[in-house]
Amino acid sequence: MTDSLLDEMISLEPFLWGCFIVVFIYTYLHNKNKKLRRKNREITSQLTASQLEIQEMNDQIEEIYCRDYLTGLYNLGGFQDAVVRSLERMSPLQSYHVVSIDLADFKQVNLREGVEFGDQILIEVADQFQGQLPPSVHIARYDGDQFAIGLTGDHHYLRRCVEIIDQVMSQICTERVNIEYCIGTASYPAESANASELIRLAEKRLSIEQRRMRDKEEEKRRHMEKLSAVGQLAAGLAHEIRNPLTSIRGFVQISAAESTEVKKWESIILPEIDRINDLLTQFLNLSESRPTRFQNFHVDQLISDICSLLKPKVMLMGHELVMETPKAPIYIEADPEKLKQVLINLIQNGLDALVQRGRVEIKWYVKNKGLWIEIQDTGAGIKPEFISRIYEPFFTTKDEGTGMGLAICHRIIQDHGGCMRVESRMGKGTTFHLSLPLKQEPVQMEEDCALFGE
């Protein structure tokens, strides 16, 4: 029994050894496989991390490629891509707008102040746009001195963004340098079918505004040339004419005292001589080289004095002269005599325009760091075809006018760094808008007549 059991065990020994070897090999391979899987997972994780790093680097490179090197804003290509993505995400009921902005004559700033100064201005504009416009808008700089802004929203939202742009530019112009700018806008889907059409339309409207601004500057240049010609004429002839005219006037007065024949013509001759003298005085005023004498004074008191001076004439004519006084006193740095000359001229023009019993109203207030004055009458108005010529020397619609008053007023306002504009409706009346800086600084106020209507 014992021998047989021992024989059986001996016979099973190879089998047991085989099972042991199989288990050993299985365990070894299983552990090896676990290590390999763990290693594979580590390699896969490292590969995934490397792919993410590569993707991030690609995104950074692409972002750098789409960005302006100076300001960090989008460049034109990046802006176009951003607009395309925005239009793809929009719902059918939403609108997208592009605002193109050009800093006119910015090259002159670089030439006058240096490229480094010009770059600082561009950086400041970009920072102000980023800080004051909503974070959702896309902002780009391209072609050196042009900016573009893309935004989603209704037309009220667009108007608000344009107001912010005006505020930013006004602040920079006031604090640093005088820069004129123009704006062109376009909307999707109301005015364009895709992103390229939208941007192209905004650029087209911007070019129209640029051309309008150039035409305006050319018109101003021609106007100044006319004033210069008139000034030279006045300076060369006024004194030479006035001297013999004085002799003629004295001779007429002496002759009238001695001769009844001359006496009856005295009342006609002397007023005409005085009229020539008045015209010569206006010539001299137009060509006057006396520098503007700036001083701080109380605007309210100056205008009150002017109205008191003109009140008797207004009452005799049967009209009204009304002042709309601001709540707080206003002080300005300007030439009080020259400003007084402008206001008297404009108020008298308003009174002369009143056919029946009418009204001239003058109001003044502070806005955008400037003094704004409005002189409004209820007269017959100015014909539209005459509006562009009213500042030309010798142009007048009055029977006894010289055509010099408004030319002198316009020059005085420009000498103060301000601007002057007129609105008129036939049968309704005329309003003259004046804008003057409260403080005389190296920069002048931006002459943007669109602000006058606000």
Image (tube, rainbow, N blue to C red):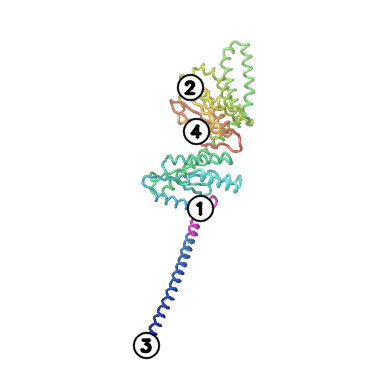
Query: In this figure, which residue is indicated by the disc labeled 1?
Result: 67
Q: Nearer the viewer, residue 419 or 159?
A: 159
User: Magenta segment range?
Assistant: 56-71
Up the image or down, 102 lies above or below 252; here it is below
Do the CB atoms of the residues marked 2 and 3 lie less than 8 Å apart?
A: no
Looking at the figure, which quarter contains the N terminus? Answer: bottom left
Question: Residue 261 is drawn in which quadrant?
Answer: top right
Q: Position of residue 81 (x, y in %)?
A: 44, 52
Disc 1 versus disc 4: nearer the observer: 1
Q: Position of residue 59 (x, y in %)?
A: 48, 57
Do the CB atoms of the residues marked 3 and 4 lie less than 8 Å apart?
A: no
What amino acid is at disc 4? Answer: Phe
Q: Is residue 373 left or right of residue 80?
A: right
Whether residue 121 can be seen here: yes
Disc 1 versus disc 3: nearer the observer: 3
Residue at left 49%, top 51%?
74
Q: Secondary structure at mark 4?
A: helix
Q: CA distance from mark 2 to mark 3?
A: 144 Å
Q: Reading the chain from its start, which is encountered first: label 1 or label 2?
A: 1
Q: Nearer the viewer, residue 387 or 170?
A: 170
Q: CA distance from mark 4 to mark 2?
A: 21 Å
Dot 3 alpha-carbon crowd within 10 angstroms: few under 14, some 14 to 19, many 20 or more: few
Query: In this figure, which residue is indicated by the disc labeled 2?
Result: 359
Query: In this figure, which residue is indicated by the disc labeled 3?
Result: 2
Query: In this figure, which residue is indicated by the disc labeled 4?
Result: 452
Q: CA distance from mark 1 to mark 3?
A: 94 Å
Dot 1 alpha-carbon crowd within 10 angstroms: few under 14, some 14 to 19, many 20 or more: many
